[in-house]
Image (cartoon, rainbow, N blue to C red):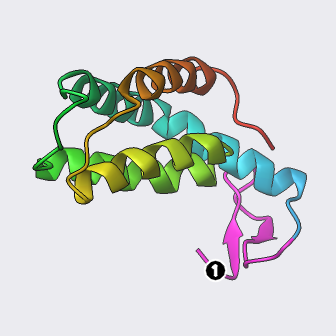
Amino acid sequence: MTGTETTPSTGTDAIDLTVGAPVTPDVQLLLRSIWERNQERVLGRVERVRTAVEATDPRRPVLALSHELQADLHALMGALGTFGWPEGSALVQGIYSCCVAAQPLERRDLMLARLSELDRDLRGTPSS
């Protein structure tokens, strides 16, 4: 989104969503509203990624990504950063990078622990 958009709270107030614009209470309200509509979808993606990571052998390269898993990883990288979880976005980026480079998920147990922690965090409120 660029320029001004209508907030869902009043339907008439225009807010500035350009890059670098200050994060006003109206922008926070808009982001919270978008998050609430998408939270379950994001949680489902985290669960599918966790299931895929659990299925890997940490000593063997990950040789292929299903189109669904690749889409989940890409969507999570963007959504987590947008909604205030940059550490989660970096975690997903690391998993994606290992998969694309056909490298073993050597730190698989750590990734699984961090995915569980991310799941718990996502059930709360995004940071502002």
SS under mark 1: loop
Q: How far across and down, in percent of the image, does residue 107 sit?
A: 41, 31
Image vertical order of residue 93 relative to residue 113, above or below: below
How dense is the environment of label 1, judged by Cα within 10 Å: few (below 14), some, or many (20 and up)? few
Locate residue 79 relative to residue 71 in the image: left or right.
right
* Residue ID at (31%, 33%): 49
* Residue ID at (17%, 46%): 68
Foreground of the two, 17 or 67? 67
Rendering quarter of residue 50: top left
* Residue ID at (30%, 46%): 72
* Residue ID at (63%, 42%): 87
- What's drawn in magenta, residue-wise? 1-21
Q: Which residue corresponds to mark 1? A: 2
Foreground of the two, 40 or 91? 91
Which residue type carries mark 1? Thr
> Which quarter of the rendered picture does the C terminus lie within?
top right
> Which quarter of the rendered picture does the N terminus lie within?
bottom right
Image vertical order of residue 42 relative to residue 51, above or below: below
Locate residue 90 relative to residue 54 in the image: left or right.
right
Q: How far across and down, in percent of the image, does residue 96 sit?
A: 34, 51
Rendering quarter of residue 57: top left
Q: How far across and down, in percent of the image, does residue 105 sit?
A: 31, 37
Was residue 6 drawn as part of the magenta stretch in this picture? yes
